[in-house]
């Protein structure tokens, strides 16, 4: 069982991902944006973070930058409905612990991504 933080401003997406992960017997925490996620991250030991890219207050890229500075090996799954290719490539190049999963593929592939990230 892993402790996983889901960061997304969409309540439905957070709920569906939470359900998938709890069904797989993971401990799941949720945050509505990067700023809230930082509070969770500072107070808990996480095994994985799953974050949206576009969020208010602190977006996914800002969250990744902050987390990786202090915990570079923490696996992170970055989700987005659409992200500019050069921004995505920059994130993936600078942060090797990040994997990208398009939101339209979450239902079909999230469990595989989580399994791979935790091994």
Image (cartoon, helix red, strand yellow):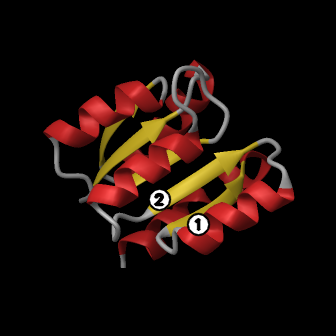
Image coordinates of residue 60 in percent, x first then y, are 56, 42
Image coordinates of residue 106 in percent, x first then y, are 67, 51
Q: Is residue 1 above or below residue 34?
A: below
Check contact, mark 1 vs mark 2: CB within 8 A.
yes
- Please identify the residue farthest to the bottom as the structure is shown: 119
Horizontally, residue 43 falls left or right of residue 18, namely left
Which residue occupies 57% across, 23% down?
A: 9
Q: Is residue 119 above or below residue 105?
A: below
Which residue occupies 63% across, 68% down?
A: 92
Residue at mark 1: 99
Q: Between 24 and 64, which is closer to the camera in this rendering? A: 64
Q: Circle 1 sits in a helix, a strand or a loop, which is it?
A: strand
- Spatial separation of the CA atoms under disc 1 and disc 2: 6 Å
Horizontally, residue 108 falls left or right of residue 31, namely right
Image coordinates of residue 112 in percent, x first then y, are 56, 69
Horizontally, residue 103 falls left or right of residue 112, namely right
Which residue occupies 47% across, 23% down?
A: 32
Q: Circle 2 sits in a helix, a strand or a loop, which is it?
A: strand
Circle 1 packing at 10 Å, graded few (<14), some (14-19), many (20+), is some
Image coordinates of residue 37 in percent, x first then y, are 37, 33
Which residue occupies 59% across, 21% down?
A: 56
Q: How many marks?
A: 2
Horizontally, residue 53 falls left or right of residue 37, namely right
**Quadrant the N terminus occupies:** bottom left
Q: Between 45 and 26, which is closer to the camera in this rendering? A: 45
**Quadrant the C terminus occupies:** bottom left
Circle 2 packing at 10 Å, graded few (<14), some (14-19), many (20+), is many
* Dot label at residue 63: none
Residue at mark 2: 76
Q: Earlier in the sequence, mark 1 or mark 2?
A: 2
Q: Between 10 and 67, which is closer to the camera in this rendering? A: 67
């Amino acid at each position: 069982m892993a402790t996983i933080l889901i960061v997304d401003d969409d309540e439905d997406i957070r709920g569906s991902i939470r359900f998938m992960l709890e069904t797989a017997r993971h401990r799941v925490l949720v945050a509505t944006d990067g700023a809230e996620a930082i509070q969770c991250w500072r107070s808990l030991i996480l095994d994985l973070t799953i974050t949206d890219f576009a969020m208010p207050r602190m977006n996914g890229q800002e969250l990744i930058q902050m987390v990786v500075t202090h915990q570079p090996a923490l696996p992170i799954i970055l989700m987005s409905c659409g992200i500019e290719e050069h921004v995505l490539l920059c994130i993936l190049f600078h942060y090797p612990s990040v994997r990208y999963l398009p939101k339209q593929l979450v239902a079909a592939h999230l469990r595989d991504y989580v399994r791979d990230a935790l091994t």
